[in-house]
Image (tube, helix red, strand yellow):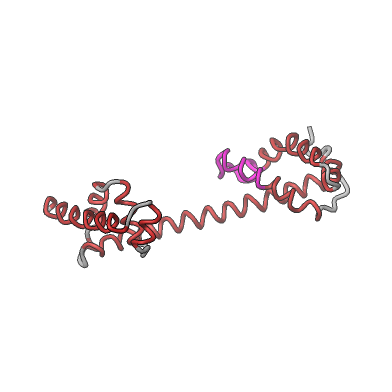
Amino acid sequence: MNPALGCHKLLIQYQGGDWEAFDILFGEKFTSLLQCVIKETRLILDEMEAEGIVQQAFLKVCVKIKTYRGQTDGEAWSWIRTIARNKWRDFLRQKKRYEQRLVSLNDEFCVRRLIMFDDHAVDRIDWLESFVATLTIRERQILELMQDGVSQTIIAAQFGLCLPRITQIKQSIKKKAQKFEKQTL
């Protein structure tokens, strides 16, 4: 069955203010558009990501409906697919930038944590990874925020703790680092 059939009529009705037409369009065309996105992205996206992109594409159809000027079902379907294509391209670009940023932040974060404890520790990344593994989740989160330059006041507010408690956790992290250093020598 051609996924384009009926798209133009439904878009025109929706353009005229008929929300029921949009509901029908969404219900009838969601699966077809999802299959198109999965096929066009060549399985780079998992199914949940693809579904999110299709939902965003239909939301964009709502926003841009006044700009629709198609005359046929084929043009309507192409318009919808173009919106979805732009959404998945944007998503993949953002995902790639995010992954690159994570890699660089992770490297930078490790070095910054090393420097916090010892100016000569740049050669001891294995030590740092082992040490960080001994910290509690909250201590790791606070250490990461401190290394990112977040003030203790903001950290306290973010975790719902008082400022003296954040200072205490910071001191605890330093003591653990010193103790861990002695044990590993």
What is the x, y in percent for residue 107?
35, 59
* Residue 76 in sight from this viewpoint: yes
**Residue situated furthest top in the rendering:** 1
User: Is residue 53 located in the magenta-colored stretch of the structure?
Assistant: yes
Identify the magenta region: 37-56
What is the x, y in percent for residue 117?
22, 62
- State whether residue 16 is above or below residue 106: above
Q: Residue at x 63, y 45 (%)?
A: 53
Left or right: 33 with respect to 137? right
Left or right: 47 with respect to 75? left
| Quadrant into which the N terminus falls | top right
* Residue 74 in sight from this viewpoint: no
Q: Residue at x 78, y 44 (%)?
A: 77
Q: Residue at x 34, y 56 (%)?
A: 144
**Residue situated furthest bottom in the rendering:** 119
Q: Nearer the viewer, residue 171 or 117?
A: 171
What is the x, y in percent for residue 145?
36, 58
Q: Nearer the viewer, residue 49 or 139?
A: 139
User: Is residue 162 located in the magenta-colored stretch of the structure?
Assistant: no
Corner quadrant of residue 67: bottom right
Left or right: 144 with respect to 7? left
